[in-house]
Amino acid sequence: MDSIPSILNQFKNKQVLIIGDAMIDAYMWGNIHRMSPEAPVPVVEIEKRESRLGGAANVALNIQSLGATPVLFSAIGTDHYGDVFSMLMEKQKLSCEGIQRLSDRNTTVKTRIISDNKHVLRVDEESTKPITEHFIATELETLIRSKKFDVIIFEDYNKGLLTETLIKKAIQIAKELKIPTIVDPKKDNFFAYKGVDLFKPNLKEIKEGLSVEFNVLSETELSENVRLVLKKLNAKSVLLTLSEHGIYFQSKTQIFKEAAHKRNIVDVSGAGDTVVSVAALALACGLGSEGLMRIANLAGGLVCEKVGVVPILIEDLINSCEN
């Protein structure tokens, strides 16, 4: 890890395009003192509310906190929550130039109700219908060609922005311009990302994508299933996060694996966003495969020591590498 701090210092020179489903993570904190007289459910007396950037927008926050410049391409509604999302972006000093506002679409909001430090209920307001408007692809192409991006991240939450057509078009342009690509996939379009440089599912996603169960502790079963993903996608490499079992990298010629770092795990929320952000910037800086895997693993563990979905700080990552 000795050379990694020097690589981390190169992050500030990179410009990153994030294409994906952005949303608002809303929180309500309160207390339960009684049951409802109308139904056998508790009444939560709300004392505090907060709205945060979520989904692909949290990846943009991670890229920003790592010192690089993020540009987010996503779609939100023209509704009230769309206004809230835009204000949150401006508050965080994130560019809205890639944000498409659609009149026939809801802005995705996930509201978590918390009482006595316990997650009581989550309410989702969203549109998941695929976005088929042709101007979306045109806007994306214009954006990619208008700037000098060092890496492109696809952040898929199955909310409808990343259709097969848009994915294919973006990868085609990226290859033409020699921009490396990395994908954080979900089940619906799992095998649509053909020809990407780095494919980053987690264990649940690769099992769902392949529709198989396998023993993660078996090196043979693990490598065989990752090899199948590489073949189906014609991808250059796969970076597979294994939760408490660590992280795994495989290409056509290399295999690396590292155990999870011993941590005081507080909250795993947002760890995947951090891993893909760090891996993308390491890819843009030309860090070798094993170093990329190790720094991504380190970063994912660090944010699990924080409460809630929070971006990783470049200072914490540098200090961890040096210690």
Image (tube, rainbow, N blue to C red):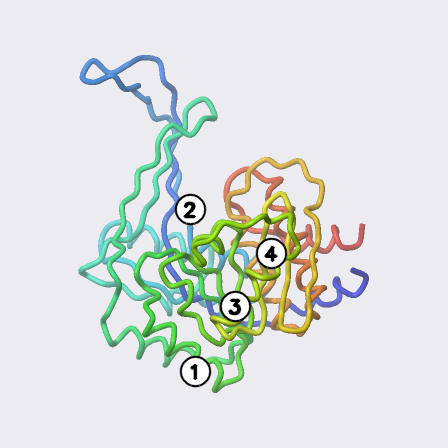
Compare residues 128 and 100 and report the one nearer the observer. 128
Q: Residue at x 78, y 60 (%)?
A: 1
**Residue 173 tag number:** 1
Mark sitting on residue 52: 2
Q: Which amino acid does label 1 sit on?
A: Ile
The residue at which mark 3 appears reads as: 182
Q: Upstream in the sequence, badge 3 or badge 4?
A: 3
Q: Are marks 1 and 3 in contact (CB under 8 Å)?
A: no
Element on which disc 1 rests:
helix
> Do labels 3 and 4 touch, CB within 8 Å?
no
**Mark 2 Cα within 10 Å, few/some/many (few <14, many 20+)?**
some
Residue 272 placement, left or right of 164: right
* Mark 3: amino acid: Ile
Single out the mark in the foreground, 4 or 2.
Answer: 4
**Circle nearer the N terminus (2, 3):** 2
Does residue 168 lie above or below 238 as drawn? below
Secondary structure under badge 2? Answer: strand
x, y percent for residue 56: 43, 58
On screen, residue 311 above or below 169:
above
Q: How crowded is mark 3: few (under 14 residues within 10 Å), some or many (20 or more)?
A: many
Say whether disc 1 or disc 2 marks the residue closer to the N-terminus.
Answer: 2
Measured in 3D between alpha carbons, the distance from the residue under mark 1 to the one under mark 4, in whole angstroms, is 32 Å
Amino acid type of disc 2? Arg
| Residue 168 drawn above or below residue 131 | below
Name the residue beneath numbered marker 4. Answer: 222
Residue 249 in percent (x, y) is at: 64, 62
Q: Please state which of residues 148 and 160 is positioned toward the viewer in this rendering.
A: 160
Foreground label between 1 and 2: 1
